[in-house]
Image: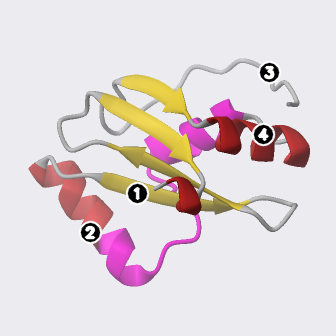
């Protein structure tokens, strides 16, 4: 996995503990994408490649304490989801097939 210059995560919501599935970590390493870069984007409210309905749901989720979903395409054409649980106890990076 590539390393990125450390920058603090300025979050729009609590992330809780951060987890990743083994398949997501392998996909990120293969694509040379830092998991922290995706976490940072998710935390800032950059949901990646989600449709307009999911985008609106994420803004509602921030206001009402529901699950938040981001979807990012990797250079390898694989997709990684980042999901923050409704209770904000955890954020997980995973592949769609891990869900």
Q: Are marks 2 and 1 in contact (CB under 8 Å)?
A: yes
Q: CA separation, marks 2 and 1? A: 9 Å
Q: Earlier in the sequence, mark 1 or mark 4?
A: 4
Judging depth in this view, the residue of 46 and 75 nearest the camera is: 75
Q: Earlier in the sequence, mark 3 or mark 1?
A: 3
Q: Is residue 20 magenta?
A: no
Circle 4 sits on which residue?
26
Q: Which residue is at a point 34% across and 30% down the rendered structure image?
A: 90
Q: Earlier in the sequence, mark 2 or mark 4?
A: 4
The range drawn in magenta is: 35-56
Q: Earlier in the sequence, mark 2 or mark 1?
A: 2
Q: CA separation, marks 3 and 2? A: 31 Å
Circle 2 sits on which residue?
57
Q: CA separation, marks 3 and 1? A: 25 Å
Instruction: Assess disc 2: are there few (<14), some (14-19) or many (≥20) residues with their C-alpha within 10 Å of its C-alpha.
Output: some
Quadrant placement of the C terminus: bottom left
Q: Which residue is at a point 78% across and 39% down the rendered structure image?
A: 26
* Element assignment for label 2: helix
Residue 16 relative to residue 6: left or right: left
Circle 1 sits on which residue?
69
Q: Position of residue 80 (x, y in %)?
A: 63, 55
Circle 3 sits on which residue?
5
Q: Is residue 14 depicted above or below 72 in this figure?
A: above
């Amino acid at each position: 996995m590539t390393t990125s210059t450390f920058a603090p995560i300025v979050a729009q919501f609590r992330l809780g503990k951060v987890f990743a599935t083994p398949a997501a970590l392998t996909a990120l390493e293969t694509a040379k994408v830092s998991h922290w870069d995706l976490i940072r984007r998710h935390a800032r409210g950059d949901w990646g490649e989600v449709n307009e309905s999911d985008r609106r749901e994420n803004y509602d989720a921030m206001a009402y304490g529901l699950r938040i979903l981001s979807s990012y395409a990797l250079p390898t054409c694989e997709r990684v989801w980042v999901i923050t649980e409704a209770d904000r106890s955890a954020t997980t990076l995973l592949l769609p097939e891990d869900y």
